[in-house]
Amino acid sequence: MERAENEVDFNSPTYIIEDFSPLQLSDLLLWKHVGTQLRFDEDIQIKPFLLEIAKGAFTLLNPNMVPVIVKIWFLENKLMFHCDCNESKSRLCNHQAHALHRIIKDEEIRIFYDDFLRKEKLKRIAKDYGIEHEQDTVGFFNLVYHNEKLTITPKLPNLLNVTQHNIARLKADLLVDKHQAFKRIELDVDTKRIVVVQHHRYYKHLLLN
């Protein structure tokens, strides 16, 4: 089930976990807010159709039930839930519990709710780009979840990771006889061009602008 982002309303929670921290994302949190009546149905498919930092919306599908939408969002130390089912909301309903369990167990979904996990993972990725010493490595990358897969890409298109493959590609691009940019071109004598050469912030190689 596909829904547009602007159709999802993250308001009117039907259940709230107060004083929440991402460090609490565990089976213990589930049992505390569901109780011994929790039974996981392996036939239920839990499909996120919207995931952003600190919020997500999930469709729960089962051949024996009408599709249910569960929304879970984290704001001001509160983990909030919304589900339109008829179950009592004095605790997490069965649908909310299944969605929360998916968040806890699936790292590619949990990363949107767990800022500790997000910072750790992005810092490792940032190392390949030479920006691991930046205070906010999260600000350099986009996290996109699509077709049951997480993709992490740089926000800046010219931010290139320094893997062996890209180093080899850059070397090939810099060879005069292998790159169109170095072929003879006609220049307007009245046009002034400036080349800026500077050191990379953390490494010794040079950058040309």
Image (tube, helix red, strand yellow):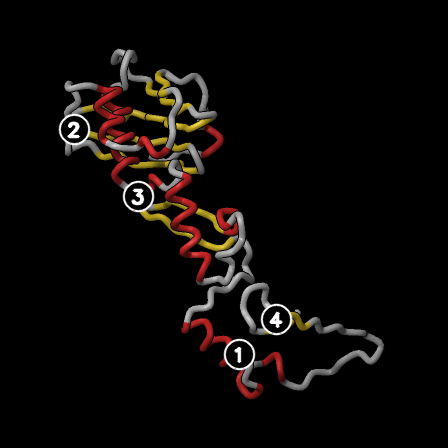
Q: Is residue 98 left or right of residue 174?
A: left
Q: Position of residue 156 (x, y in %)?
A: 55, 56
30 vs 142, left or right, is: left
**Secondary structure of the residue carrying numbered label 4:** strand
Foreground disc of the pair 2, 3: 3
Residue pointed to by mark 2: 40
Q: Earlier in the sequence, mark 2 or mark 3?
A: 2
Asked if marks 2 and 1 touch (Cβ < 8 Å), the reply is: no
Answer left or right for 15 relative to 130: left
Is 39 on the left-hand or right-hand side of 200? left
Q: Nearer the viewer, residue 77 or 40?
A: 77
Name the N-terminal-most of marks 1 and 4. 1
Q: Residue at x 51, y 76 (%)?
A: 170
Earlier along the polypeptide chain: callout 3 or callout 1?
3
Q: Residues within 10 Å of mark 3 (few under 14, many from 20)?
A: some
Q: Which mark is residue 173?
A: 1
The amino acid type, in three-letter code, at marker 2 is Phe
Which quadrant of the rendered structure holds the C terminus? bottom right
Where disc 2 sits, the SS reads: loop
- Label of residue 107 in the image: 3
Q: Nearer the viewer, residue 97 or 132?
A: 132
Distance (Cα) linking label 4 and label 2: 54 Å
Quadrant containing the N terminus is: top left
Q: CA distance from mark 3 to mark 4?
A: 36 Å
What amino acid type is highlighted by mark number 3? Glu
